[in-house]
Image: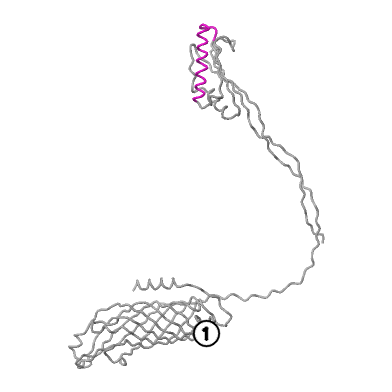
Amino acid sequence: MKKLLFMALLFICATPVLAQEKEETGHPTAPYNFIGLQGGVQNTFNSEFNNWKTFTPTASFSIGRWFTPVVGARLHLNGAWAKSGINYPLGTEDGHYNYNYVTPTADVLVNLCTLFGKKDWYPVNLVFVGGLGANYAFENYFRSEEKALGSTMLYADNDNRWGFNGKVGLMLDIPICKWLSFNLEGDLNARYVGKHEVFNDDILQFVGQAGLTFKFGYKKAKPAPVADVEPEPEPQPVYRTRIDTIWYDDVQYKDKFAGQKTEWKVYYGLAGSDFPDSAKELKEACEFAKKYEGVKMNVVGYADKGTGTPSVNMKYSKLRAEKAVKAMKDAGIDGSLISMDYKGDTVQPFADNDKNRVVIITAEGTEKTKEKVVNKKFRTKEVRERIQ
């Protein structure tokens, strides 16, 4: 039952919702919801028994929605009790059997009047009904016409059974007012209803019912447009136009180049030539090479005259210059920016003898900056002002 109800819900949700606006017919049109109550008779046809004896009362409950004036859908539940019978070849134990049944179906509704007509509302509507669902038969028992106890026990079958059900039918729907309509419906069900192998030909059922349909959930109609009332014309204002001059600063920036020059001194001990990698002078030289443009660096090595011989001092000044250049290259300075020289003890840059064991690094570069240039300019603006 749960699976069937779930499939029916999916069926209704998948039906195209093509809602139309209410036309000016004086009657509300789709979309709207409805609940239906019906009562009537049913007959399950049997080829082995007198079908005039097998009419029984039946009732139905339905809930659904008309999506458009043409297409709708509903969940329909029909049931009560049914009667059928059997004739035996010898004609001595003809009898009938009764059972209760419930038939839930998911139905499609098509209004044939609005489908083939030109209006969305008719005083009488002919609706095609088609549906799929199930049939549940229960509480079956058999009675012999001669009330023979042996026959009653022989054909009793108390098992409840589910079966497939397919439905086609027609419904005549007559609107009474906005919320209510009267209907007559006739359906033909193709299904399995028998409870025993003897009753397997009980597959067709006719159901004829009359009932009422309660409608609700209409889409609200759009309010009628209110005719615009033209106001009295107001006096037209008078304007004049003047030209204003607006002065402003036109700010621009141009490149400015400024030369920069600096030098670093690295001192050594006696017979020392290794350039210290951690020297702050090396770090500053690297930053200078990155910051300025057109950089040129010159490295000159020296030796003190107060110790050693001229040839030894020349060798140490050269080693000091070479190792300084190598340290600068290892630190990331492009070698093409560096020039090198060494003086031995031929040049003494300092009066203090010990300070002449030194490497002097000089650097030159150009710093590029932006210079703010302000020019006074003006533009004109058209101003419209009211004078009356």
Can you tell which quarter of the image residue 195 is in?
A: bottom left
Q: How crowded is mark 1: few (under 14 residues within 10 Å), some or many (20 or more)?
A: some
Residue at 35% from the left image edge and 71% from the top image edge:
3
Can you tell which quarter of the image residue 222 is in?
A: bottom right
Side (left or right) of 82 relative to 375: left
> What type of secondary structure mainly makes up the magenta span?
helix
Side (left or right) of 320 relative to 384: left
- Say what secondary structure mark 1 lies in: loop
In-front residue for pair 125/281: 125
Whether 343 is drawn above or below 290: the answer is above
Q: Position of residue 155 (x, y in %)?
A: 21, 85
Which color scheme is applied? one colour
Q: Considering the image in quadrants, where does the C terminus appear?
A: bottom right
Side (left or right) of 361 relative to 76: right
Residue at 79% from the left image edge and 65% from the top image edge:
236
Say whether residue 308 is magenta. Answer: yes
Label total for image:
1
Whether 338 is drawn above or below 353: the answer is below
Whether 157 is drawn above or below 9: the answer is below
Look at label 1 and name its amino acid: Tyr
Q: Where is residue 38 in the image (x, y as percent from the top left)?
A: 41, 85
Q: Position of residue 356 (x, y in %)?
A: 55, 12
Q: Considering the image in quadrants, where does the N terminus appear?
A: bottom left
Whether 295 is drawn above or below 7: the answer is above
Which residue, given by chain and number where applicable, does mark 1 sit on? 122
Can you tell which quarter of the image residue 46 is in?
A: bottom left
Q: Give the range drawn in magenta.
A: 304-330
In-front residue for pair 334/56: 334
